């Protein structure tokens, strides 16, 4: 195989190791996630109280495991974020959580084919000191027939995840050498069903 001109970190995260959280483990994670939600600066907006939390597949990178989550609130907003932890001899330790909220809901955007959330969790230094943003991406497909989701940077696959109860989690480099992530949904037979960028273009902005 010849040398590549796209030298970038790929498939850096471990694939999901556990099923979606439930029982006491889900309760433990929920405590940290809800605490992070309480710390959100809503700028005076009453976003309400969190309802049922939906968990996403775990992914591990750089010594930490990330479990994303979303939850609707009593006022119709959506909370999104993650709980992360390190593995210690006695089990999970050093829990950290991050959360934010949005009024942009999937049901109000019928043109969406993938409902995505993302957060930068670190960086990776490449050639010439250029840096990629290591980005946690999680979401659900809004169309049927999907089996696996990939993250691609300049048409190079840099991570993938099989759907687990119609949910997926990715950890991939983004914003590297002026290239940006695209998330693609594939069928079992390898047909591309949908693609979505993490970036929403402003129709009123100049090119």
Image (spheres, rainbow, N blue to C red):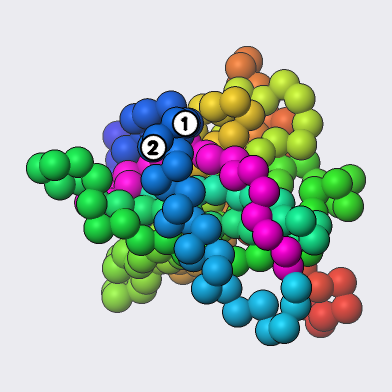
Residue tagged by mark 2?
Answer: 25
- For this rendering, which residue is in front, 74 or 76? 74
In this picture, residue 195 sits left or right of residue 202: left
Q: Residue at x 60, y 79 (%)?
A: 41
Position in image of residue 199 (x %, y %): 67, 64
Residue tagged by mark 1?
Answer: 22
Position in image of residue 129 (x %, y %): 29, 75
Residue 155, label in figure: none
**Taking the image as drawn, is residue 9 in sight?**
no
**Taking the image as drawn, is residue 144 in sight?**
yes
Position in image of residue 84 (x %, y %): 36, 53
Residues packed near mark 1 inside 10 Å, few (<14), some (14 to 19) or many (20 plus): few
Q: Residue at x 59, y 34 (%)?
A: 167
Element at label 2: helix
| Quarter of the C terminus within the rendering | bottom right
Q: Residue at x 36, y 65 (%)?
A: 122
Element at label 1: loop
**Quadrant in the rendering for residue 205:** bottom right
Residues packed near mark 2 inside 10 Å, few (<14), some (14 to 19) or many (20 plus): few
What residue occupies the far top of the structure in this picture? 189
- The boundaries of the magenta stretch are 47-65
Q: Is residue 61 magenta?
A: yes
Q: CA distance from mark 1 to mark 2?
A: 6 Å
| Quarter of the N terminus within the rendering | top left
Q: Is residue 207 magenta?
A: no
In this picture, residue 185 sits left or right of residue 181: right
46 over 200 or under it: above or below: below
Position in image of residue 206 (x %, y %): 81, 82
Q: CB atoms at circles 1 and 2 under 8 Å apart?
A: yes
């Amino acid at each position: 195989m010849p040398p590549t001109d796209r030298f970038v970190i790929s498939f850096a995260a471990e694939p999901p190791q556990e099923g979606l959280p439930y029982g006491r483990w889900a309760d433990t994670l929920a405590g940290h996630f809800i605490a992070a939600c309480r710390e959100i600066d809503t700028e005076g907006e009453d976003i309400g109280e969190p309802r049922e939390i939906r968990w996403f597949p775990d992914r591990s990178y750089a010594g930490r495991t990330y479990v994303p989550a979303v939850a609707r609130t009593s006022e119709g907003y959506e909370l999104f974020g993650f709980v992360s932890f390190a593995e210690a001899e006695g089990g999970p330790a050093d829990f950290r959580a991050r959360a934010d909220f949005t009024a942009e809901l999937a049901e109000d955007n019928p043109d969406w084919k993938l409902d995505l959330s993302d957060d930068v969790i670190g960086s990776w230094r490449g050639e010439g000191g250029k840096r990629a943003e290591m980005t946690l991406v999680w979401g659900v497909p809004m169309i049927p027939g999907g089996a696996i989701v990939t993250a691609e940077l300049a048409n190079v696959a840099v991570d993938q995840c099989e759907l687990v109860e119609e949910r997926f989690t990715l950890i991939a480099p983004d914003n590297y050498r002026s290239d940006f992530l695209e998330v693609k949904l594939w069928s079992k037979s390898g047909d591309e069903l949908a693609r979505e960028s993490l970036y929403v273009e402003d129709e009123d902005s100049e090119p």
